[in-house]
């Protein structure tokens, strides 16, 4: 926790010191996972998004309607993972729909012990398909929603250090996914996101189905367009979150938005 707080404070301090007052998001900039929430946005053709480890994923705008995503840390560790998002053609500029498919192959057995409350043994695959909707409410507000289905070949939940419960095993199990989110353009250089999700997710607490999660995020475009490309293409978030995993009788919260994530997004035609 101390390292997370120090990293967040350092990022904010440096960003404001180097020119946040002159920074701004591109009005047409697509947001794939603001606050960890899937929108119906897709990257523009030949646009790239790269998030470094520990978040570790990249995406590419293959066409006007198709974005390809790759979870490269998981893949390099022997668990190939990625997603495809296809935005349905529409004449509206204010409402969009997209279909997203995600999959990870546990080519070898995995024990996920990142949570202090539970461990998960996984093998086989875990996949989802989501129908996503994004709509503009006004010049400064948008809302997003999705529904879908998650499938896991095999999962075994059992206690870690901070929880006690009887082990639970799921085989060939399908469970629902759903979520709703609000997005506010609070400043030209800052967006505020609030979302609720149920089920499996991609950015925060991934590979855990049937969970409840609430996330609040401050998203920044910290550097002016006059800065070097490495700086002007940087985006970073600070998030607060609450997570409940009923399977493990475990809850976790970070009530202050200090959890940092960052990525670079550039290109597009």
Image (spheres, rainbow, N blue to C red):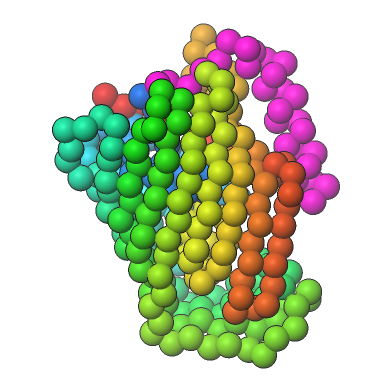
Query: For this view, does 13 lie left or right of residue 236?
Result: right
Coordinates of residue 55 in the picture (x, y in percent): 56, 49
Q: Is residue 203 above or below residue 6?
A: below
Count of numbered circles in the view = 0
Q: Quadrant of residue 7?
A: top right
Coordinates of residue 148 in the picture (x, y in percent): 35, 63
- Residue segment shown in magenta: 1-27
Whether residue 136 is visible, yes or no, is yes
Q: Nearer the viewer, residue 206 or 94?
A: 94
Residue at 49% from the left image edge and 41% from the top image edge: 182
Quadrant location, the C terminus: top left
Is 5 a magenta residue?
A: yes
Magenta segment main secondary structure: helix
Q: Quadrant of residue 266?
A: top left
Q: Nearer the viewer, residue 50 or 126?
A: 126
Is 88 a magenta residue?
A: no
Q: Quadrant of residue 17?
A: top right
Q: Which residue is at the far front?
A: 137
Q: Which residue is at the far right?
A: 2
Q: Is residue 29 above or below residue 250?
A: above
Coordinates of residue 93 in the picture (x, y in percent): 25, 29
């Amino acid at each position: 926790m101390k390292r997370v707080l120090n990293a967040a404070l350092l990022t904010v301090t440096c960003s404001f010191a180097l020119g946040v007052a002159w920074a701004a998001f591109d009005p047409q900039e697509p947001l794939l996972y603001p606050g960890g929430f899937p929108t119906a946005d897709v990257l523009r053709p030949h646009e790239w998004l790269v998030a470094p480890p520990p978040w570790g994923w990249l995406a590419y705008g293959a066409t006007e309607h198709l974005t390809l995503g790759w979870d490269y840390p998981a893949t390099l560790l022997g668990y190939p993972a990625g997603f495809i998002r296809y935005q349905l053609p529409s004449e509206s500029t204010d409402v969009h729909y997209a279909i997203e498919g995600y999959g990870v192959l546990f080519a070898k057995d995995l024990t996920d012990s990142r949570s202090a409350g539970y461990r998960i043994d996984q093998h086989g695959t875990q996949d989802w398909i989501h129908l996503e909707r994004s709509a503009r409410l006004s010049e400064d507000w948008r809302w997003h929603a999705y529904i879908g289905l998650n499938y896991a070949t095999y999962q075994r939940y059992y206690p870690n250090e901070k929880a006690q419960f009887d082990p639970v095993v799921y085989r060939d199990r399908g469970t629902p996914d759903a979520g709703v989110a609000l997005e506010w353009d609070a400043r030209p250089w800052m967006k505020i996101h609030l979302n609720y999700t149920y089920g499996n997710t991609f950015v925060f607490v991934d590979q855990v189905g049937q969970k409840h999660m609430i996330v609040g995020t401050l998203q920044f475009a910290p550097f002016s367009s006059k800065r070097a490309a490495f700086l002007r293409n940087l985006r970073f978030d600070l998030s607060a979150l609450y997570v409940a995993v009923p399977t493990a009788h475990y809850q976790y919260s970070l009530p202050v938005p200090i959890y940092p994530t960052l990525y670079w997004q550039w290109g597009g035609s």
